[in-house]
Amino acid sequence: MQRTYWPTWRKFLAQWGLVSSACAIMDLTQPLLPFVAQIMVLGMPLFKGAALGQSYGNLLTMLGDEAALMQFKDYLQEAGS
């Protein structure tokens, strides 16, 4: 799993005060996140050419991988401490 975007995502969430909310959402919706990732694939052509394309693709990959998602959640919680 490529983690190069994790600090950027954490910074964005922290900037808006959403780190704890994001962790709670990941816990509550964990079974649905692979399905959400599949729906988000429909938006991939819109972001593919944009600067967000690579980050968006990595987010989709992470949402579809339960182990990576839990590692990201742990990363957010460690960084927030």
Image (tube, rainbow, N blue to C red):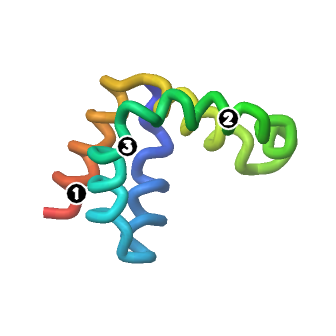
Label 1, label 3: how far apart the Cα atoms are? 22 Å
Q: Position of residue 64 (x, y in %)?
A: 49, 25
Task: State which quarter of the image contains the N terminus.
Answer: top left
The earlier-in-sequence mark between 3 and 2 is: 3
The residue lying at 22 percent from left, 57 percent from top is 79
Give the total of numbered labels.
Answer: 3
Relative to residue 14, is residue 42 drawn left or right?
right
Which amino acid type is shown beneath numbered disc 2?
Answer: Ile
Instruction: Give the residue displayed 41% in from the left and 52% down from the top.
Output: 7
Q: Position of residue 74 (x, y in %)?
A: 21, 43
Q: Earlier in the sequence, mark 1 or mark 3?
A: 3
Give residue 79's mark: 1
Q: Residue at x 38, y 31 (%)?
A: 31
SS type, badge 2: helix
**In this view of the protein, which residue sits in the foreground, 66 or 30?**
30
Residue 29's tag is 3
Residue 57 shown left or right of residue 65 in the figure:
right
Q: Residues within 10 Å of mark 3 (few under 14, many from 20)?
A: few
**Location of mark 2 (residue):** 39
- Secondary structure category for the residue under label 1: helix
**Residue 8 in picture, x, y percent from top left:** 48, 55
- Other residues around mark 2 within 10 Å, as few (<14) / some (14–19) / many (≥20): few
